[in-house]
Amino acid sequence: MLRKFRVDIVRLKTDFCITKMMDIHSLNWEATYETLNQKGFAILPKVLSPAECQHLAGLYGDCGLYRATINMKRYRFGVGEYKYFSYPLPPVIQVLREMFYSPLCGLANDWMHQLDIKTDFPHHHRDLILQCRDNNQMRPTPLMLRYETGGFNTLHQDLYGDVYFPFQIIFVLTQPGRDHVGGELILTEQIPRAQSKAAVLQPNQGDALILTTNFRPAMGARGYYRSKMKHGVSEVKSGVRYSLGIIFHDAA
Protein backbone atom coordinates (compact mmCIF):
# COMPACT_ATOMS: atom_id res chain seq x y z
CA MET A 1 0.00 0.00 0.00
CA LEU A 2 1.40 3.39 -0.98
CA ARG A 3 1.46 6.01 1.72
CA LYS A 4 -0.26 9.33 1.12
CA PHE A 5 1.97 12.37 1.46
CA ARG A 6 0.25 15.69 2.09
CA VAL A 7 2.43 18.75 1.70
CA ASP A 8 0.32 21.77 2.65
CA ILE A 9 3.14 24.30 3.03
CA VAL A 10 6.82 23.66 2.56
CA ARG A 11 8.92 26.67 3.51
CA LEU A 12 12.48 27.03 2.28
CA LYS A 13 15.19 29.50 3.27
CA THR A 14 13.43 32.23 1.29
CA ASP A 15 9.87 33.53 1.56
CA PHE A 16 8.78 31.21 -1.26
CA CYS A 17 6.52 28.35 -0.25
CA ILE A 18 4.84 25.49 -2.08
CA THR A 19 1.14 25.38 -1.23
CA LYS A 20 -0.18 22.33 -2.99
CA MET A 21 -1.27 18.92 -1.82
CA MET A 22 0.90 16.12 -3.18
CA ASP A 23 -0.68 12.71 -3.64
CA ILE A 24 1.59 10.09 -5.20
CA HIS A 25 -1.45 7.86 -5.76
CA SER A 26 -2.38 10.13 -8.65
CA LEU A 27 0.69 8.97 -10.59
CA ASN A 28 0.36 5.95 -12.90
CA TRP A 29 2.60 3.60 -10.95
CA GLU A 30 1.51 0.39 -12.65
CA ALA A 31 2.63 1.72 -16.02
CA THR A 32 5.77 3.10 -14.42
CA TYR A 33 6.69 -0.27 -12.90
CA GLU A 34 6.14 -1.99 -16.24
CA THR A 35 8.37 0.50 -18.06
CA LEU A 36 11.08 0.28 -15.40
CA ASN A 37 11.06 -3.51 -15.69
CA GLN A 38 11.31 -3.39 -19.47
CA LYS A 39 13.70 -0.48 -19.96
CA GLY A 40 15.32 0.44 -16.62
CA PHE A 41 13.90 3.98 -16.81
CA ALA A 42 10.53 5.75 -16.93
CA ILE A 43 9.32 9.35 -17.25
CA LEU A 44 6.66 10.80 -14.94
CA PRO A 45 5.26 13.91 -16.68
CA LYS A 46 4.55 17.25 -14.98
CA VAL A 47 5.48 16.26 -11.44
CA LEU A 48 6.62 19.82 -10.66
CA SER A 49 4.97 23.05 -11.76
CA PRO A 50 6.90 25.73 -13.71
CA ALA A 51 6.95 27.93 -10.60
CA GLU A 52 8.40 25.11 -8.50
CA CYS A 53 11.02 24.38 -11.16
CA GLN A 54 12.00 28.04 -11.34
CA HIS A 55 12.34 28.27 -7.60
CA LEU A 56 14.39 25.10 -7.29
CA ALA A 57 16.73 26.27 -10.04
CA GLY A 58 17.08 29.54 -8.12
CA LEU A 59 18.44 27.66 -5.11
CA TYR A 60 21.63 26.99 -7.07
CA GLY A 61 23.08 30.33 -6.04
CA ASP A 62 22.51 29.81 -2.29
CA CYS A 63 25.94 28.55 -1.22
CA GLY A 64 24.72 27.88 2.32
CA LEU A 65 22.66 24.90 1.15
CA TYR A 66 25.55 22.80 -0.17
CA ARG A 67 28.37 20.66 1.20
CA ALA A 68 30.43 20.47 -2.01
CA THR A 69 30.69 22.00 -5.47
CA ILE A 70 32.11 19.82 -8.25
CA ASN A 71 33.70 21.21 -11.41
CA MET A 72 33.14 18.42 -13.93
CA LYS A 73 36.00 19.44 -16.21
CA ARG A 74 38.51 19.23 -13.37
CA TYR A 75 37.62 15.59 -12.73
CA ARG A 76 37.05 14.75 -16.43
CA PHE A 77 33.36 14.06 -15.76
CA GLY A 78 32.37 16.45 -18.55
CA VAL A 79 31.88 20.22 -18.64
CA GLY A 80 29.60 21.89 -16.12
CA GLU A 81 29.06 22.09 -12.39
CA TYR A 82 27.01 20.36 -9.75
CA LYS A 83 26.46 20.89 -6.04
CA TYR A 84 25.62 18.37 -3.32
CA PHE A 85 23.13 19.52 -0.70
CA SER A 86 24.20 19.35 2.93
CA TYR A 87 22.21 18.10 5.89
CA PRO A 88 19.68 19.16 6.94
CA LEU A 89 18.25 19.07 3.45
CA PRO A 90 15.90 21.87 2.38
CA PRO A 91 12.39 20.68 3.34
CA VAL A 92 11.18 20.31 -0.24
CA ILE A 93 14.21 18.15 -1.12
CA GLN A 94 13.64 15.98 1.96
CA VAL A 95 9.95 15.58 1.08
CA LEU A 96 10.70 14.55 -2.50
CA ARG A 97 13.31 12.06 -1.32
CA GLU A 98 11.01 10.39 1.19
CA MET A 99 7.87 10.63 -0.95
CA PHE A 100 9.27 8.79 -3.96
CA TYR A 101 11.21 6.19 -2.00
CA SER A 102 8.11 4.39 -0.71
CA PRO A 103 6.52 3.39 -4.05
CA LEU A 104 9.93 2.36 -5.42
CA CYS A 105 11.19 0.19 -2.56
CA GLY A 106 8.76 -2.65 -3.35
CA LEU A 107 9.97 -2.87 -6.94
CA ALA A 108 13.57 -2.59 -5.72
CA ASN A 109 13.04 -5.66 -3.54
CA ASP A 110 11.42 -7.50 -6.46
CA TRP A 111 14.53 -6.81 -8.53
CA MET A 112 16.84 -8.09 -5.79
CA HIS A 113 14.76 -11.28 -5.52
CA GLN A 114 14.78 -11.86 -9.28
CA LEU A 115 18.57 -11.48 -9.36
CA ASP A 116 19.09 -13.60 -6.22
CA ILE A 117 20.76 -10.70 -4.38
CA LYS A 118 20.53 -10.95 -0.60
CA THR A 119 19.32 -7.39 -0.03
CA ASP A 120 16.05 -6.29 1.55
CA PHE A 121 15.31 -2.57 1.34
CA PRO A 122 13.30 -1.16 4.28
CA HIS A 123 9.90 0.41 3.68
CA HIS A 124 10.88 3.72 5.29
CA HIS A 125 13.61 5.87 3.78
CA ARG A 126 14.96 6.83 7.20
CA ASP A 127 15.87 3.17 7.76
CA LEU A 128 17.82 3.10 4.51
CA ILE A 129 19.78 6.11 5.75
CA LEU A 130 20.52 4.21 8.97
CA GLN A 131 21.90 1.33 6.88
CA CYS A 132 24.10 3.84 5.06
CA ARG A 133 25.41 5.22 8.35
CA ASP A 134 26.21 1.71 9.58
CA ASN A 135 28.44 1.44 6.50
CA ASN A 136 30.06 4.88 7.03
CA GLN A 137 28.04 6.45 4.21
CA MET A 138 27.06 9.70 5.88
CA ARG A 139 27.20 12.39 3.17
CA PRO A 140 23.91 13.40 1.51
CA THR A 141 23.73 12.86 -2.25
CA PRO A 142 20.80 14.96 -3.59
CA LEU A 143 22.32 17.46 -5.98
CA MET A 144 21.69 20.38 -8.33
CA LEU A 145 23.30 20.40 -11.79
CA ARG A 146 23.99 23.35 -14.07
CA TYR A 147 25.20 23.24 -17.69
CA GLU A 148 25.98 26.24 -19.86
CA THR A 149 26.69 26.24 -23.60
CA GLY A 150 29.19 23.45 -24.33
CA GLY A 151 28.37 21.59 -21.10
CA PHE A 152 27.88 17.84 -20.97
CA ASN A 153 28.15 14.91 -18.56
CA THR A 154 29.95 11.67 -19.39
CA LEU A 155 28.30 8.28 -18.94
CA HIS A 156 28.39 7.21 -15.29
CA GLN A 157 26.63 5.57 -12.35
CA ASP A 158 25.79 7.15 -8.97
CA LEU A 159 26.64 4.42 -6.45
CA TYR A 160 28.86 6.05 -3.76
CA GLY A 161 29.36 2.96 -1.57
CA ASP A 162 28.40 -0.62 -0.77
CA VAL A 163 24.84 0.40 0.18
CA TYR A 164 22.96 1.74 -2.83
CA PHE A 165 19.30 1.94 -3.80
CA PRO A 166 18.66 0.72 -7.37
CA PHE A 167 16.66 3.81 -8.43
CA GLN A 168 17.26 7.55 -8.60
CA ILE A 169 15.24 10.46 -10.01
CA ILE A 170 16.19 13.40 -12.21
CA PHE A 171 13.81 16.38 -12.16
CA VAL A 172 14.12 18.59 -15.24
CA LEU A 173 13.96 22.25 -14.13
CA THR A 174 14.35 24.05 -17.49
CA GLN A 175 12.47 23.70 -20.76
CA PRO A 176 14.29 22.29 -23.80
CA GLY A 177 13.91 24.50 -26.85
CA ARG A 178 13.22 27.57 -24.72
CA ASP A 179 15.81 27.74 -21.96
CA HIS A 180 18.41 25.63 -23.73
CA VAL A 181 19.06 23.64 -26.89
CA GLY A 182 20.64 20.20 -26.59
CA GLY A 183 21.38 18.66 -23.22
CA GLU A 184 19.48 15.45 -23.91
CA LEU A 185 19.62 12.66 -21.37
CA ILE A 186 21.59 9.67 -22.67
CA LEU A 187 21.11 6.18 -21.24
CA THR A 188 23.04 3.10 -22.30
CA GLU A 189 22.37 -0.55 -21.53
CA GLN A 190 25.03 -3.21 -21.85
CA ILE A 191 23.85 -6.06 -24.06
CA PRO A 192 25.54 -9.48 -23.53
CA ARG A 193 27.99 -10.35 -26.31
CA ALA A 194 26.95 -7.24 -28.27
CA GLN A 195 27.34 -3.45 -28.38
CA SER A 196 25.54 -1.29 -25.85
CA LYS A 197 22.03 -0.02 -26.56
CA ALA A 198 21.45 3.75 -26.22
CA ALA A 199 18.30 5.80 -25.49
CA VAL A 200 18.13 9.57 -26.03
CA LEU A 201 15.50 11.38 -23.94
CA GLN A 202 14.38 15.01 -23.81
CA PRO A 203 11.91 15.36 -20.92
CA ASN A 204 10.04 18.63 -20.47
CA GLN A 205 10.30 21.06 -17.58
CA GLY A 206 8.73 19.54 -14.48
CA ASP A 207 9.05 15.94 -15.67
CA ALA A 208 10.74 13.34 -13.46
CA LEU A 209 12.92 10.62 -14.94
CA ILE A 210 13.26 7.52 -12.77
CA LEU A 211 16.26 5.39 -13.74
CA THR A 212 18.32 2.58 -12.33
CA THR A 213 21.54 3.48 -10.54
CA ASN A 214 23.32 0.29 -11.60
CA PHE A 215 21.43 -2.43 -13.50
CA ARG A 216 18.01 -3.87 -14.20
CA PRO A 217 16.96 -7.54 -14.20
CA ALA A 218 16.68 -8.81 -17.77
CA MET A 219 15.43 -12.24 -18.78
CA GLY A 220 17.92 -14.46 -20.57
CA ALA A 221 18.06 -18.10 -21.61
CA ARG A 222 19.06 -19.12 -18.06
CA GLY A 223 16.87 -16.76 -16.10
CA TYR A 224 17.37 -13.19 -14.98
CA TYR A 225 20.74 -11.50 -15.33
CA ARG A 226 22.07 -8.04 -14.42
CA SER A 227 21.81 -5.69 -17.40
CA LYS A 228 24.17 -2.82 -16.54
CA MET A 229 23.11 0.73 -17.36
CA LYS A 230 24.78 4.15 -17.35
CA HIS A 231 23.51 7.68 -17.95
CA GLY A 232 24.86 11.07 -19.00
CA VAL A 233 23.93 14.37 -20.65
CA SER A 234 24.68 15.36 -24.25
CA GLU A 235 26.28 18.70 -25.11
CA VAL A 236 24.21 21.83 -24.47
CA LYS A 237 24.29 23.80 -27.72
CA SER A 238 22.98 27.04 -26.25
CA GLY A 239 21.36 28.41 -23.09
CA VAL A 240 21.51 27.10 -19.52
CA ARG A 241 20.18 23.75 -18.31
CA TYR A 242 19.29 23.00 -14.67
CA SER A 243 18.23 19.71 -13.11
CA LEU A 244 17.73 18.26 -9.64
CA GLY A 245 18.99 14.78 -8.83
CA ILE A 246 17.43 12.78 -6.01
CA ILE A 247 19.64 9.86 -5.00
CA PHE A 248 18.21 7.88 -2.12
CA HIS A 249 21.38 6.44 -0.54
CA ASP A 250 24.16 8.51 1.03
CA ALA A 251 27.85 8.59 0.13
CA ALA A 252 30.92 7.33 1.92
Image (cartoon, rainbow, N blue to C red):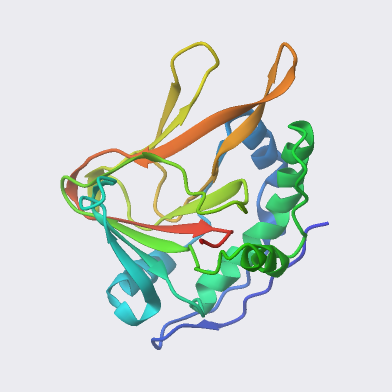
Residue occupying the point 29% across, 38% down:
234
Tell how many labels.
0
* Looking at the image, residue 252 lies above or below residue 87: above
**Furthest residue toward bottom:** 15
Q: Is residue 21 above or below residue 120?
A: below
Q: Find residue 218 and report its image quarter.
A: top right
Residue 25 horizontal/vertical position (percent): 72, 57
Determine the residue positioned at 46% across, 83% down. 12
Which image quadrant is residue 199 in?
top left
Return the residue nearer the eye: 163 or 185.
Answer: 163
Image quarter for residue 203? top left
Give the quadrant of the N terminus.
bottom right
User: Is residue 178 among the parts visible in the rendering?
Assistant: no
Q: Nearer the viewer, residue 75 or 113?
A: 75
Depth check, front residue: 193 or 60? 193
Residue 139 as seen in the image, left or right of residue 124: left
- Specify the farthest residue to the right: 1
Q: Can residue 68 be seen in the rendering of this structure?
A: yes
Q: Residue at x 62, y 80 (%)?
A: 8
Rendered location of residue 249, percent (x, y): 58, 59
Residue 243 coordinates in the image, percent (x, y): 37, 56
Q: Is residue 123 left or right of residue 188?
A: right
Q: Is residue 145 left or right of residue 118?
A: left
* 68 vs 110: above or below: below
Q: Position of residue 142 (x, y in %)?
A: 47, 63
